[in-house]
Amino acid sequence: MQTLDRPDLIGDDEVDSLFHALADTTRRDILRRSAAGDLSVSRLADLYPMSFAAVQKHVAVLERAGLVIKERRGREALVCTDQAAVRRARLALDHLEATWRARVDAMTGLLDEDSEQRKGAAR
Amino acid sequence: MQTLDRPDLIGDDEVDSLFHALADTTRRDILRRSAAGDLSVSRLADLYPMSFAAVQKHVAVLERAGLVIKERRGREALVCTDQAAVRRARLALDHLEATWRARVDAMTGLLDEDSEQRKGAAR
DNA sequence: CTAACGTACAACTAAATGGTTGTAGGTAGG
DNA sequence: CCTACCTACAACCATTTAGTTGTACGTTAG
């Protein structure tokens, strides 16, 4: 079911919008509630203490970030969270951690080289 | 309406600031470069096409999100990314995914019940 | 057909963000 | 000592964001 296993690298702008979309409690809640894809924007809007238009904008942010898709069903738009999206977020985190761990390893590598040198000098 | 107060989970505001801090290319780069904890704010500022104060603000955002700590060494402040921080981000993603997967499972559970019924009513 | 519903979008406000410059104070090197 | 460096922070500006209301338009129900 996963459209994965491809080393699809994500651009900086995409990661920006991804994390920005996730950086809001209401939007994260919308994500959770839209898992089943059976809620329209109006039904979602009923759940929050803000106007319909405000919720509509939140959904738009999530949509631009690729976290949800809207499927038009008659006069209503059903919101459905993209299963692969969180995977992309996780990939971004993985990449971030990998890069910086590489730097740490590079430094400890230098330190090891240093001790290797000391070892070599002792030899 | 109710927020889950599990002991190992992070509050909404913390997740907000966490993801918000991650939603900026410069800040993610600072995070990577500060892995070894050997760069001061000034040295970091040299790496970006913006003023020292701007970088200082980015570091402050990361610091408020708990992603880095500043260790004062003499007249300079060494920036060091907190190793546990990305783990917290990952936990937040895990929790998000878990919650919504629970909803999906609940729905597919209903569907399964439905197919069980159909199976039982098989002609 | 008409009325009600759901959505889209525009215009507006208040507040937050990302950037700038300037100033003040602590610390180190010469 | 004193000068240069590093940091902290304030004030300001432009842009974006999160919210509002209002309006227009397609779709469904009665």
Image (spheres, coloured by chain):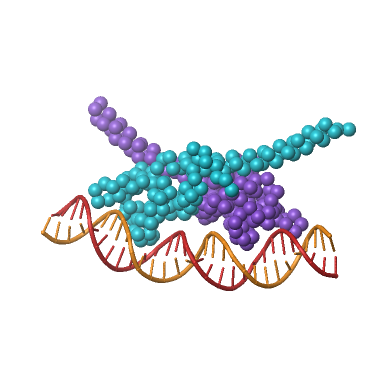
Chain colours: A purple, B cyan, C red, D orange
Q: Which residue lies at the image location 63% right of the left edge and 44% below the top edge?
A: A83
Which quarter of the image is occupied by the N terminus of chain A? Answer: top right
Residue B63 in view (yes/no): yes
Q: Residue furthest top?
A: A123
In the depicted structure, whether residue C11 falls above or below residue A117: below
| Residue C11, quarter of the rendered image | bottom right
Where's residue B118, x and y in %? 82, 35
| Residue A118, quarter of the rendered image | top left
Q: Residue furthest right?
A: B123
Where's residue B92, x and y in %? 52, 43
Q: Which residue lies at the image location 65% right of the left edge and 48% below the top edge?
A: A34
| Residue B120, quarter of the rendered image | top right
Where's residue A123, x and y in %? 25, 26
Where's residue B45, x and y in %? 35, 55
Q: Nearer the viewer, residue B11 or A75?
A: B11
Q: Which residue lies at the image location 69% right of the left edge and 51% below the top edge?
A: A39
Q: Nearer the viewer, residue B47 or C27?
A: C27
Q: In the drawing, does residue B42 fall left or right of residue A63?
A: left
